[in-house]
Image (cartoon, helix red, strand yellow):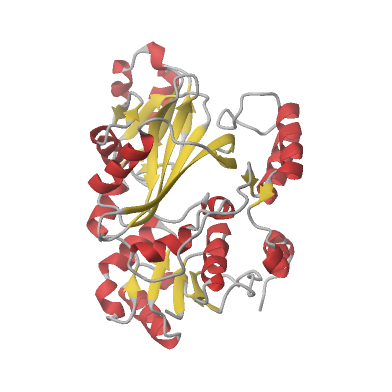
Amino acid sequence: MANVVLFGPWGPESLAFARSLRRRGIGTYLVHATDQSPQQWSLSSLRGSATMPARLEQTPEGIAWLAEYVRGVDASALVATADGDLIWLARHRHEFGPGCRVLVEPAESLDALLSKRHQASLARDAGLAVLPTHVLMHHDDADSIPASDYPLALRPDRRGDVEPAFKVRLVASRDELRQVIRDSTRIASPILAQPFQRLPNLIVHGARSISGEVIASRCYRVPRKFEGVTLTLEPQRFPEGLEGACATFARLAEITGCYHLEFLHSGGEDLAHFLEVNVRMGGTTDKVVRTGFDEPSLLLQSYGIATTPTSPAIHVPRRVANKRALLKHIVHAAVGSLTPLDYPDVNRWRHIAYSCRDLMVARDSIFDWRDVSGSLRFHLRSLMPARR
């Protein structure tokens, strides 16, 4: 293998992917569907890049454009970083010919996994714990939820099926829940409601081959969250039974390639409650790669593409963070704009102190001494003029 095309925006997971493949002598070509002039990308980790007109995304013309680009750079594989794009490419994989493999599971199974209800059902079948889940379509559905379950965390069953759109929303009472449902102008699939618990997350990263074998799996604790997503991450042992149950989930879901499952973790009981799964690279890819879990390389291995076997890191850092995100967190805390989704539950000055500490002691998920110019360019990208 010489080249891979990565379809998606330039972000931390794209940088981690390109760096991993470059270390194995494989070139990455980035294609982003946008009408804007791209910001200066870290060209030291890319072999090439291009922008596709945004109007072509999710169209037959876009597939033809991308297939021509793949042939032009002699790419052996095509990867994407967004769920919708993965499904789009999976449905048209035959149009890229035998010389280029689309590294994604069948569109049907991936589309089914975009439903959080389906995910929760698979999790129960796999033996994973799931919080009590209420299914809401009408404001009267709120009447069946016991008062003891409040506050509630609300999530759409499928992203984009509820308008105004939201990813996670908290409600403290039945009246507030009924109002949220009334204010929704569109509910195409249910809103799921679960008791909100202030707990750290666990994330299990894994990779499953097309032959059905889980070729790698590792557990991480998320001691700090910002805007509901991972701020800091550190390796942790698997709670008893969790690794096997996650492998069973991957089998039932027919996952191939890389994936990560997210849980709420009750330390006292050592119990992990399933939240969701993502069957793609994501917001923690850059962090787990820095701990030695080479997710991009494992993705290729899952599809039978030979790469240098991933070896354990000699030094596994205790904590990893994107330090740009830490700075953003400090600013939000300083102006008092943190939310209940930020963890742990401490005052803003303690939040600032924790982020200042992590700026000093955590390993940056972006900075790499083997790519100093690319690291600096990536961290400063919003401050740099757009490339013409």
**Which residue is more in the foreground, 56 or 182?**
56
The percent position of residue 198, horizontal first and vertical second, equals 52, 24
86 vs 148: above or below: below
27 up-or-down from 103: above or below: below
Q: Position of residue 268 (x, y in %)?
A: 49, 19
In this view, the residue in front, 211 or 326, is: 211
> Is residue 188 visible to the viewer in this orientation of the structure?
no
Q: Nearer the viewer, residue 245 or 327?
A: 245
Horizontal and vertical percent for residue 139?
32, 25
Residue at image coords 71%, 63%: 369
Q: Is residue 221 visible?
A: yes
Task: Identify the image quadrant of residue 181.
Answer: top left
- In the rendered view, tell whether residue 200 sits above or below residue 53: above
Q: Which quadrant, please, contains the C terminus?
A: bottom right
Asked if residue 125 lies left or right of residue 272, the reply is left
Tell me the quarter of the image containing the N terminus.
bottom left
Q: Residue at x 44, y 28 (%)?
A: 153
State how many labels appear: 0
- Give whichever of 184, 355 is nearer the camera: 355
Residue beneath the point at 26% across and 39% down: 122
x then y, percent, for residue 6: 46, 70
Task: State the image quarter where residue 165 is shown.
Answer: top left
Q: Quadrant of residue 72?
A: bottom left
